[in-house]
Amino acid sequence: MNKEIIILGETIINLYKKNKEALVEKLILKLKKNGQTHFLKQVLAYLKEKDLENQGLIKGVLKIAFGENDIDFIKEKIEKKLNKKIVLEKIKIDENLILGGLFLSKNYKIDFSYKNILNKIFNQTWKI
């Protein structure tokens, strides 16, 4: 997100906190009038992300090697490791991971794939 979106999003949040919804409506109408409606979609995405953050939730993508049978188990283990609840935005199948999976979010990367474990073993073994 660029600075303009963050500033606009924080401005809307602050105006709502001060019960100035009329100013928010005027701001939105001004953006529409100036043909800058593309900002509104990005601001809405920022506000949704901020809301999840305030609720203590982490939004992310889960890549798994195969099968979607163990999603709940995997989600539970990731939540336990992060000590926060997660919201899975997407679940992708990635055969390159060999086994296991990968959780990616804005601030976290948890790689629990067999490929990652093998890479760590071989990189540590051959260092002298």
Image (tube, helix red, strand yellow):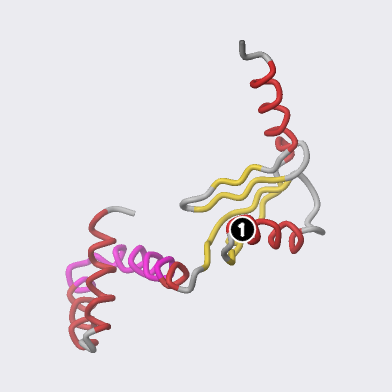
Quadrant the N terminus occupies: bottom left
Question: What's the amino acid at mark 1?
Answer: Lys
Horizontal side of 67 relative to 44 (left or right) equals: right
Residue at 25% from the left image edge and 55% from the top image edge: 3
Taken as a whole, is the magenta stretch helix, strand or loop? helix
Q: Position of residue 6 (x, y in %)?
A: 28, 61
Say which of 31 and 46 sits in front: 46
Quadrant the C terminus occupies: top right
Q: Position of residue 106 (x, y in %)?
A: 47, 52
Toward the front, the furthest residue is 128
Magenta stretch containing residue 43, yes or no? yes
Toward the top, the furthest residue is 128
Say which of 74 and 127 sits in front: 127
Q: Quadrant of residue 121?
A: top right
Residue at 18% from the left image edge and 83% from the top image edge: 23
Please tell me how crowded label 1 is: few (under 14), some (14-19), or many (20+) other residues with Cα within 10 Å. Answer: few
Residue at 24% from the left image edge and 67% from the top image edge: 8
Label 1, secondary structure: give it. strand
Q: Quadrant of residue 49?
A: bottom left
Q: Position of residue 119 (x, y in %)?
A: 68, 26
Q: Which residue is mark 1?
A: 90
Q: Is residue 32 above or below residue 6?
A: below
Magenta region, residue range? 31-50
Residue at 28% from the left image edge and 68% from the top image edge: 9
Magenta stretch containing residue 118, yes or no? no
* Tally of marks: 1
Horizontal side of 128 relative to 9 (left or right) equals: right
Q: Quadrant of residue 28?
A: bottom left
